[in-house]
Image (cartoon, helix red, strand yellow):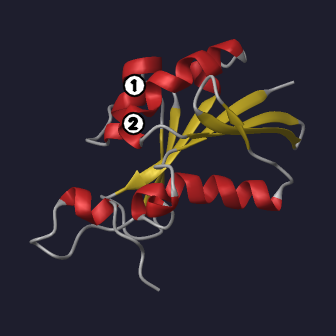
Amino acid sequence: MTKVAIIGLGNPGPTYLRTRHNVGFWLLDRFAEENNFTFRLDSKSDSEISENIYYEKKIMLIKPMSFMNDSGSHLLPLLRSNGYENNQILVIHDELTLPLGGIKVSSIGKGSGGHNGIKSLIDSVGNTFIRIRIGIGSKKIPEQTLSEYVLSKFSN
């Protein structure tokens, strides 16, 4: 059976729950809710994971509970112990260079594009995974730092 590991990048805890940087978590939570996936904490990888069959594929959803910039080091053992190769890994994350709600699929072999969560993954597992970038728009307030922007909550 074909299998796919889908990693949603974000930061743990209620402080970051509705921030731009947590788009990866949001999408995994929504997918899980609509498709009968239930997350559980995997203490070895410090990740919330959920496994189920979806359209005849074994899917593992992964939300690293380490902070975004350190997510890669915890994931390699989880992925390898479950038999996932890099070409079976899909990563969902926020993207500043895309307009709000824009989507871009990046092929295998790209760099981090300045995204520290992706850099952490590349440092741990290499760059041969597929990325789905979700646009969060660019910052509009010149005085606001990049970090302040990505960690800010979406307005209604």
95 horizontally vs 9: left or right = left
Give the residue type at disc 2.
Ile
How much space separates mark 1 and mark 2, taking CA atoms? 6 Å
123 horizontally vs 23: left or right = left
Label 2 secondary element: helix
Taking the spot 81% from the left edge, 61% from the top edge, the residue there is 34
* Residue 85 visible within the image: no
Vertical arrangement, residue 147 with respect to residue 74, above or below? below
Q: Which mark is residue 122?
A: 1
Label 1 secondary element: helix
Residue hosting label 2? 118
99 horizontally vs 30: left or right = left
Residue farthest bottom in this picture? 156
Vertical arrangement, residue 152 with respect to residue 51, above or below? below
Mark 1 surroundings: few (<14), some (14-19) or many (≥20) residues within 10 A: some
Taking the spot 81% from the left edge, 26% from the top edge, the residue there is 2
Front position in the image: 88 or 108: 88
Front position in the image: 47 or 135: 47
Taking the spot 77% from the left edge, 28% from the top edge, the residue there is 3
Q: Which mark is residue 102?
A: none
Vertical arrangement, residue 22 with respect to residue 100, above or below? above
x and y percent of residue 155 in the render? 41, 82
Disc 1, disc 2: CB below 8 Å?
A: yes
Vertical arrangement, residue 57 with respect to residue 55, above or below? above
Image quarter hosting the N terminus: top right
x and y percent of residue 19 in the render? 43, 65
Front position in the image: 114 or 147: 147
